[in-house]
Image (cartoon, grey):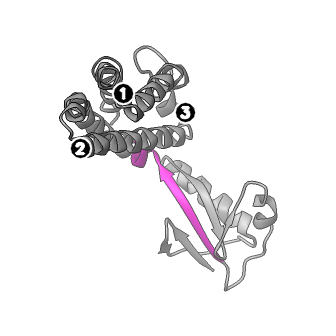
Amino acid sequence: MLLKINGQPVDVTLENEKSVGDVLKSFESEAAKNDATTVAIRLNGKDISAEQFDAAAATPLSDSTEIDLHVVSKRDIVDSFKTIAAEFNRLTEQLNDVPVQLQSGKDKEASETIASLATEVDAFCHTAALSALFPDLYNALIIDGKNLNDFFKEFSPILSDFESAMEVKDTVTVGDLSEYEIGPRLKSISEVLTKFN
C-alpha cells in the first residue's frame, strides 16, 4: 500500500488495518493530535466524494492500494490568514489609487488591482471556510463586532456595487466605495487575521 499526504509519499507501517477505512481512521486520530484534518481523499487515482466514502472505506487493502490524503492543519490556516492579511493591507493602499487611475486612462493598473481584490477575497473566503474545521479558530473570526456570516451579508452587496461601478467606469462611486467601504473592511479583516498565532 502507498500512502501519500498532500501528494508526498509517507512511510507507514500497517498494524491491524485491513481496509481503506481502517487506515483513514488510524490516520485521522494521529492527525487530530497535531491539529490537522483530512479534507479530500483520492483512492487509486480517483477523487472520493462524500457519497462514495462508505464504499471506498470498505475497500480491502492490497499491495497496489494507493491512498492520497489532502490534509489541512490549523497552522496552515493561520499561515494563510497572515499572508491574506498582508495582501489586504497592500490592497487597501492600492484601492485609493483606482479612481485616479480610471480618470487618467490607467485602466490596466486599475483592472489589476480589482483582479487582485477578487483573488484575495476569494482566498480569504476559502481559507475561512476551511477554518470551520477548527471551531476555536473560526469562532475567533469576529470582524467589526460581527461573525463572518453577518460581516459578509453586509460586505457582499458593496462588492457587487463596486463591480457594477467598475463596469460603467463610474469613477466617483468606485472612489467612494474604495475609500469608505472596501478599504476599511479589508483593514478590519487584516487586523483580525494578524492576531492569530
- Asked if the residue at tag 1 contacts the one at tag 2, i.e. Cβ–Cβ closer than 8 Å, the answer is no
* Residue 76 among those drawn in magenta: yes
Q: Nearer the viewer, mark 2 or mark 1?
A: 2
Task: Return the residue nearer the eye: 105 or 24.
Answer: 105
Q: Please name the residue that numbered disc 3 is placed on.
A: 135
Q: Please name the residue that numbered disc 2 is placed on.
A: 109
Q: Is residue 32 above or below residue 125?
A: below
Total label count?
Answer: 3
> Which label was assigned to residue 175?
none
Of the residues under marks 2 and 3, which one precedes in the sequence?
Answer: 2
Q: CA distance from mark 2 to mark 3?
A: 39 Å
Q: Which residues are magenta?
A: 66-77
- Quarter where residue 163 is shown: top left
Q: Residue shown at 40%/31% (left/top)? A: 168
The N terminus is located in which quarter? Answer: bottom right
Q: Residues within 10 Å of mark 2 (few under 14, many from 20)?
A: some
Q: Residue shown at 40%/45% (left/top)? A: 119
Instruction: Give the amino acid type for the residue marked by disc 1 in the picture.
Output: Ile
Dot 1: what SS? helix
> Which label was assigned to residue 189?
1
Q: Nearer the viewer, mark 3 or mark 1?
A: 1
